[in-house]
Amino acid sequence: MRLSTLHVLSDDELQSIHQASLELLSGTGMVVHSRKVLELLSDHGARVDPQASRVRIPPEMVEKALSTVPPKIDLYNREKELSLTLGDGTPKAASGHNAIFVLDMETGERRSATKEDVADFARLSDALSNISVVGVQAMPQDVRPQATLLHAVEAVFNNCEKHLYFSPESAEVTTAIFDMARVVCDGEDLSSHPILTCQLSSTSPFTWEGGAVEAVIETAKAGVPCCFLPQPFSGVTSPITLAGTLTVHNAELLSGVVISQLVRPGTPVIYGSAWTTFDMQKANVLIGSPEAGLMRIAGTQLARFYHMPSHTISPDSDSHCHDEQNAWERLFTSMCALSSGIDLIVNAGMFATGLTVSFEQLVMDDEILGLLFRLLKGIEITEETIAADLIDRVGPGSNFLTEDHTLKYLRTAEHWQSSISNRCSYERWRQMGGPDVVQKAREKAREILKTHQPQTLSDEVRKGIGEIIRAFEGRFG
């Protein structure tokens, strides 16, 4: 039997949040800084005040949009092979994205991320078995600022075969990345074999910036999966209560769903959540708090309520180094997320509230995920696994070491095998030099980067991607 999922909201409470969200969208409304999107919404029955850029969306528009959202999404790798299905009941993990700093593997000091770092992170993620989707791990600071994300996506495409997860801030960057993906896919329609997922965020409270909302239109037109990710801060851009934050988040997300389905009914949509609380004493946002953990569980329930695949951020920590706080917050946030029945978690390799990444952390997160994925599988109870006949035959005072049953299950996933955790005796550990887990993760990362080489893109594809970037940069002189 699999591990039971966690719940923090009753059916009535889910309905209350849904009803409040509908009332807020139809009454308070959203500010949308895009004439194109305001016209789209107005043409389909929303009440628009063009002077204030305010749109009020009636409940029936929301319900109609929800009826066309697919409950499952097939995601493909760079080679257009089916990689995973979101919504099939099996959780998946992705590396993090859009960090600014890297904790240097050689010096141990925090520094700005480079394009080479992004390439190395992509190659490392490509080799790690518990990472199914690869995010743009960091935003390189050594390239032209306007094209930062394009350079990062190029580095990922060139160094990883797994499905890509990215987060743009404008329609122009979004369309350029879609053009790059079409080059990788030999010009094929991206909706037939989506090799990438686009994350887009409203601005809390109740605002869509022009670049982000027009990127929603481009994503829906392309038929690319879209993860909507409002990010309200409790007590700052949403009420301080968890229920209030959930409601602001939910209403904003539903507005994105409406826009995407008006452009292209059936556009694949993911219910995203990056729960953030705010420490009033320290004046800082937090993603590793127990309250953020509770909202991770609630977010999955809301996604299930709408029959949408779910996403949240994890493993997460607000610590700035590889210390015990980092470890317990990562395990806590991941446990909350995965035991809720989430479909996709994104942030492996990141810490310091998502600002910093490290190669060691990505390897350690792969270890944590392996442990938790095994936990979620639970215990298989069958006549063969109970093994009563075997127990009777072996009898008292003997052992099971030489039994075929032992050999058979030794070669299955019955017992999880660690990669970097210590499982040696003290004496053996000392003989090995007494390495801690961070050292072992560093050694594993170095070995992977030294030996692992994904299949390379053709020179023609590389050239095509480079031309798109140069054309985009040419707009800025």
Image (spheres, helix red, strand yellow):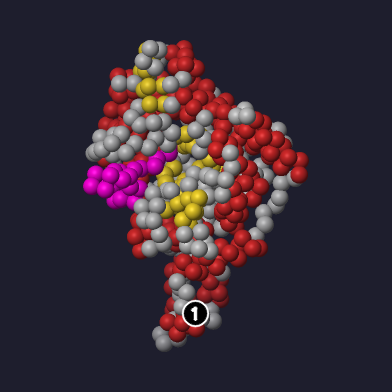
Picture coordinates of residue 68, whole percent (x, y): 48, 27
> Quick check: can you spot residue 28?
yes
Quadrant of the image for the N terminus? bottom left
Residue at left 36%, top 56%?
319
Tag 1: residue type? Gly
Quadrant of the image for the C terminus? top right
> Quick check: can you spot residue 294?
no
Q: Is residue 37 above or below residue 452?
A: above
Q: Is residue 281 magenta?
A: yes
Q: According to the image, label 1 marks what residue?
A: 433
**What span is in magenta?**
271-292
Element marked by disc 1: loop
Picture coordinates of residue 424, whole percent (x, y): 46, 78
Q: Is residue 427 magenta?
A: no
Residue at left 43%, top 39%?
272
Picture coordinates of residue 52, whole percent (x, y): 36, 15
Q: Is residue 31 above or below residue 159?
A: above
Q: Is residue 31 above or below residue 79?
A: above
Question: How would you rate the neighbour count of disc 1 (Cα within 10 Å): few for under 14, some for 14-19, many for 20 or more?
Answer: few
